[in-house]
Image (cartoon, helix red, strand yellow):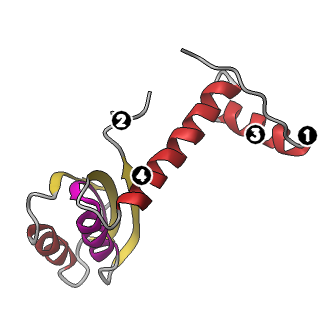
Amino acid sequence: MLQRIGVSLEESLLKQFDEDITARGYTSRSEALRDLIREQLVARRWSDSADSSAEQVAVVSLVYEHDSMDLARRLTAIQHRDPHAVVSALHVHMDHHNCLEVLILRGAARKIISLAEQLVAVRGVKFGKVVPATTGKDLT
């Protein structure tokens, strides 16, 4: 069942919001607000479960130079420390020198965070980002 709510915003903030959601392809403010709320709920669940054994899912993106100091081998070695945590890995050759690796991790939040941070922190990783995800079972 849908509920209606009212939101008061400064005119300049609403203008920026409308420009942003239009550029991103939203057809309504409502759907954009729903997505923002979902994002915050997922972040809160991650924060609340960081010290628990609750299962979580995360996406880790890494960009690195493939021929840099045996980096690919070191990244793979870290992944093999907990082989059950890495659900999937995608490796993309971006150009002659750079690779993008996208990993899906699943497990206890604290283990996933630790593994993801180890990967991002490896010397030679040009860009690393951890994105908390959700199974979606609690979100509609």
Q: Amino acid at mark 1?
A: Glu
Q: Which residue is mark 3?
A: 17
Observer-nearest of 80 and 43: 43
- The answer to whether mark 2 and mark 1 are in CB contact below 8 A is no
Local crowd size for mark 1, using a 10 Å CA cut-off: few (<14), some (14–19), many (≥20)? few
N-terminal of the two: label 1 or label 3? Answer: 1
Q: Does the magenta run of residues contain 87?
A: no
- The residue positioned 9% from the left and 68% from the top of the image is 80
- The answer to whether mark 3 and mark 2 are in CB contact below 8 A is no
Q: Amino acid at mark 2?
A: Gly
**Secondary structure type for disc 1:** helix
Numbered badge on residue 136: 2
Q: What distance separates the C-alpha of mark 2 from that of mark 4?
A: 11 Å
**Secondary structure type for disc 4:** helix
Q: What distance separates the C-alpha of mark 3 from that of mark 2?
A: 25 Å
Taking the image as drawn, is residue 25 in sight? no
Q: Which residues are drawn in magenta?
A: 98-120
Q: Is residue 9 left or right of residue 32?
A: right
Q: Is residue 59 left or right of residue 85?
A: right
Observer-nearest of 82 and 62: 82
- The residue positioned 48% from the left and 54% from the top of the image is 44
Q: What distance separates the C-alpha of mark 4 from that of mark 3?
A: 25 Å
Q: Which residue is mark 4?
A: 45
Q: Which residue is mark 1?
A: 11
Taking the image as drawn, is residue 64 in sight? yes
Q: Position of residue 30 (x, y in %)?
A: 66, 26
Q: Nearer the viewer, mark 1 or mark 4?
A: 4
N-terminal of the two: label 3 or label 2? Answer: 3
Q: Amino acid at mark 3?
A: Phe
N-terminal of the two: label 1 or label 4? Answer: 1
Q: Nearer the viewer, mark 2 or mark 1?
A: 2
Q: Quadrant of the image for the N terminus?
A: top right
